[in-house]
Image: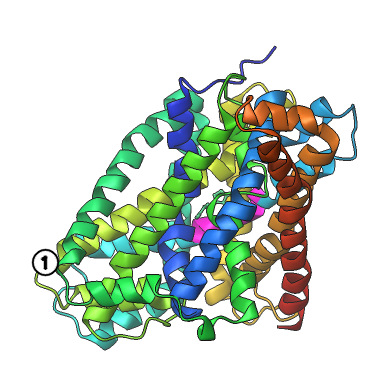
Amino acid sequence: MIDRGRWSSSLMFVLAATGSAIGLGNIWKFPYITGVYGGGAFVLVYLFCIALVGVPIFMAELYVGQTAQKSPILAFDHLHRKNSPWRFVGWLGVMSSFLVLCFYSVVGGWVFDFLFKSVTHAFVGKTDEEITGMFGVLISSPWMVLFWHAVFMIVTIVIVSVGLSKGIERVSRVLMPALLLILVSLFIWCIFLDGFSEALAFLFAPDFSKLSSKAILVAVGHSFFTLSLGMGTMITYGSYLNKSNDILKTSVLVSLLDTVVALVAGIVVFSVVFTFGHEPAAGPGLMFQTLPSLFAKMPTGNMVSIAFFLLVAFAALTSAISLLEVVIAYMVDSGMKDRKAATYQIGGMIFALGILAALSFNVLADFKIGRFTFFDLFDGVTTNIFLPLGGLLTSLFVAWMMGPKAIEFILKGRGGPLAKDSLFWTMAIIAPVCVAWVLFQGISDWIQG
Ligand code: TRP
């Protein structure tokens, strides 16, 4: 029997899982899509999606991991039968994690670069144009992006290679509280900004005339991404839990923490944006262009900038380690005894394939497969297809193949028959149908552009 490792407590799992969930999705993507899709109404739809789609699928993934005590591919075999067709879902997960990390690490590298710029006072005394131009300069310099992509991957590889308790646990125990502390400080700081109340109104006063069907699609898709669902992360992290862990409690807790962090990050970002009367709909450049140029206008701006990018760097790192862990857990479970060697090899392969994503904005910008650069391709295939498909199938598996015993296991006797039925139908029909709709729309939109 290989020693797979185990969380030292359920709380440790919550910290690590929250670390995985809170990432670039919360601090970079959530504010900018909220800006683009019109604010309050989008936020409301997003909250619905978390509750109705995100949490049930979270529970389904934890159930698979926790009861099988195995990494995704073998977990489905274990729960169903040898060479079960469901192991395809596990394969999909391992492949997606691999591909997501290829581009996630590139963006993580950009964050490291911006952290470095903040620490070295690179934004101080610069004009708006100079600062907004820096992002373009960075992504168009192949050596710079490759350097930071390498640094980000090396840090991720080192953490994962030393194992669960010495690596992921130790890092989560330090970085997660630090992350929360930085976020709370930024939040307190932004209460005193002129744009604070406007930010609250933008995020929490829904204007449904601004809601498009595309926005609903994006909200469902994002509820997946932000909770790290659909590619075996929570199956893997769940497999290191005791069977006595309370799935319902931990799923709700992690989802809640993730959502609160996204909302608070949104408040901070938009308070700054509105204080200077800027456009909320700046898109992906919101964090790398708008924010640094606004920070530079404030008396304490450089401190804030350091704190902010440190926050994002921590968040990205704890998510990246969870992505790598999915692949490594599979290698270890399938008999590769040397965890370190596995991590170096797989990490090296991810770095290598990630080079294509890193160069998508410069050397390879004109190299397209269909309409897509490698970066768009890795991102699009995983976010639009693999993730929803993985989550959909996991939810169906637990509801229809495991059935009442899974529902019993999750509810542990709490709630009456109504609770049982609602949970079952949410996992069996509601969540899968919502996700299937996103999947079909997503695929056709993405292909047609
Ligand atoms: N949830 C992370 C974020 O919000 C990203 C992430 C980590 C992820 N592991 C995942 C997304 C697994 C999907 C699946 O940035």
Q: Is residue 345 above or below residue 288?
A: above
The quadrant of the picture occupied by the N terminus is top right
| Quadrant including the C terminus | bottom right
Q: Residues within 10 Å of mark 1 (few under 14, many from 20)?
A: few
Q: Position of residue 128 (x, y in %)?
A: 24, 85
Q: Residue placed at 76% from the left, 41% from the top? A: 90
Q: Nearer the viewer, residue 73 or 246?
A: 246
In this view of the protein, can residue 151 be seen by the observer? no
Which span of residues is magenta-colored? 97-106
Residue at image location 66% in from the left, 21% down from the top: 337
Query: Is 197 included in the stretch rendered in magenta?
Result: no
Residue 331 locus on image (x, y percent): 69, 31
* 122 to the left or right of 446: left
**Does any atom of ligand 1 lie closer than 8 Å to the CB of label 1?**
no
Which picture quadrant has residue 173? Answer: top left
**What amino acid does circle 1 point to?**
Thr
Q: Could you tell me which residue is drawn at 63 percent across and 39 percent down?
A: 59
Q: To which residue does mark 1 refer? A: 300
Give the side of residue 156 with respect to residue 135, left or right: right
Considering every residue shown, the one lying at the far top of the view is 1
Residue in view at x 53 percent, y 55 percent: 226
Q: Position of residue 446 (x, y in %)?
A: 71, 76
Residue 69 position (above or below residue 424): above
Q: Please state if 247 lies on the left or on the right of 133 as rendered.
A: right
Q: Secondary structure at mark 1?
A: loop
Left or right of 103 in this view: 36: left
Nearer the observer, 156 or 405: 405
Q: Overall secondary structure of the magenta stretch? A: helix
Residue 130 in which image quadrant: bottom left
Where's residue 382, x and y in %? 68, 60
- Whether 71 is drawn above or below 209: the answer is above
Residue 138 shows up from this direction: yes
